[in-house]
Image: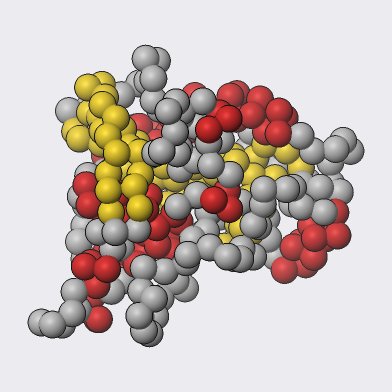
Amino acid sequence: MLAIIGGTGVDLRGENSPLTETREEIISTQHGAALVTLARHAGRDMVFLHRHANPNAQTQHLSQHLPPHRVNYRANIAALKKLGATAIFASTAVGSLRREWSSGTLVLLNQFIDCTSDRDKTFFDFGAVHIDVTNPYCAALRELLKQTARSLSLDLHDGGTYLCANGPRFESAAEIRAYEKWGADVVGMTGVPEATLAREANISYAGVSIVANLAAGLSPEPLTQAEVVDAMKIALPRVVELFLQAARDYKDDPTLPSRRATAEFKTPTFNPDSFII
C-alpha cells in the first residue's frame, strides 16, 4: 500500500479531497499516536498522513498543528508501518538556495543534510543498528515520479540536496551562506528524521520539495509564513496530480534496498519490526 505524507499546504483531507471512501483514524503505536486518513484511489487502498496533525487536538485547525520540532516522526512512520504501507511519497515546503529555482519549483530530492537536534531519530535506541543511507531516497520511487512527471508534462527538477533545519524559526542569512558552502540546494524543517525512520521501517520513501521562496539573505524581502502558505496553495494541484498519477502505477518490490534495510539484523530471536509498531 502506498502512503502520501503532506505538510504545509499539501492536504488531501476534507470534502474536496481527490481521494474516495475517506475516513480518519487514530493509529496507536508504542511511540505514540498518529492521525491518518484511510482512502481509496483508482481502486486501490491508500493512506494520507498530514505530518503536522495533532492526534490529541479537538479540531485540526492550523492553530492546532504541531510545529516541526514537535512532530512525532516515529509515531507517524510507525502508524504507516502498522497499516501496511510499503512506500511513501512525501512533500516538503522549502526555501531555495539556488537563485534560479523560483517559487513553485518542484525538486525531486536525492540527498539530505541533517542539522536537527533533540529529535527522536531512530526506532532502535537499545544498541547498534546501523542502516545504510548512502542513497536515502528510493531509486525506484524516484524513477517512477520522474516518468510520471514526463507523462504529465510537469517540470520536476531531478536531484537536490535537502538541508533539514530544526525550526520553527527561519534561518539566518549567515546560516544560509554556510549551507550553500556545504552543498545544500533547499532548506526545510521536516524531511529528517522522517526519511531515515522510513528506511528503518523498510518502507520505500521519495521526497518532493516545493520551493516557496528564496532562502534568507537571498530573498530581497523578509521571510513570512504567509508567503510559504500562498506559494504552496499554487503548487498544490501539480503535486497532487504527480503523486496520485504515480500512485496508480506503483508496484511494490520487496527486493529493493529500501525495503530490506534491516534484513541483515533479523534473526530467529530478534525482529527489528517489533521495535517499530
Observer able to see residue 24: yes
| Figure check: 271 above or below 106 | below
Q: Quadrant of the C terminus?
A: bottom left
| Figure check: 236 above or below 78 | above
Residue placed at 22% from the left, 28% from the top? Answer: 40
Q: Quadrant of the N terminus?
A: top left
Image colouring: secondary structure
| Figure check: 188 above or below 55 | below
Query: Is 82 left, or right, of 90 in this rendering?
Result: left
Residue placed at 65% from the left, 40% from the top? Answer: 211
Q: Residue 12, image x and y in percent?
A: 40, 27
Q: Residue furthest top?
A: 15
Q: Residue 47, image x and y in percent?
A: 29, 37
Q: Residue 132, image x and y in percent?
A: 40, 76
Residue placed at 39% from the left, 20% from the top? Answer: 14
Snapshot quadrant of residue 275: bottom left
Residue placed at 58% from the left, 44% from the top? Answer: 67
Q: Residue furthest left?
A: 268
Query: Is 130 left, or right, of 217 in this rendering?
Result: left
Query: Is 241 left, or right, of 165 in this rendering?
Result: left
Snapshot quadrant of residue 182: bottom right
Along the line of sight, which residue is nearer the eye, 256 or 122? 122
Along the line of sight, which residue is nearer the eye, 147 or 25? 25
Q: How many marks?
A: 0
Q: Residue 62, image x and y in percent?
A: 55, 28
| Figure check: 213 above or below 109 | above
Observer able to see residue 248: no
Along the line of sight, which residue is nearer the eye, 4 or 117? 117
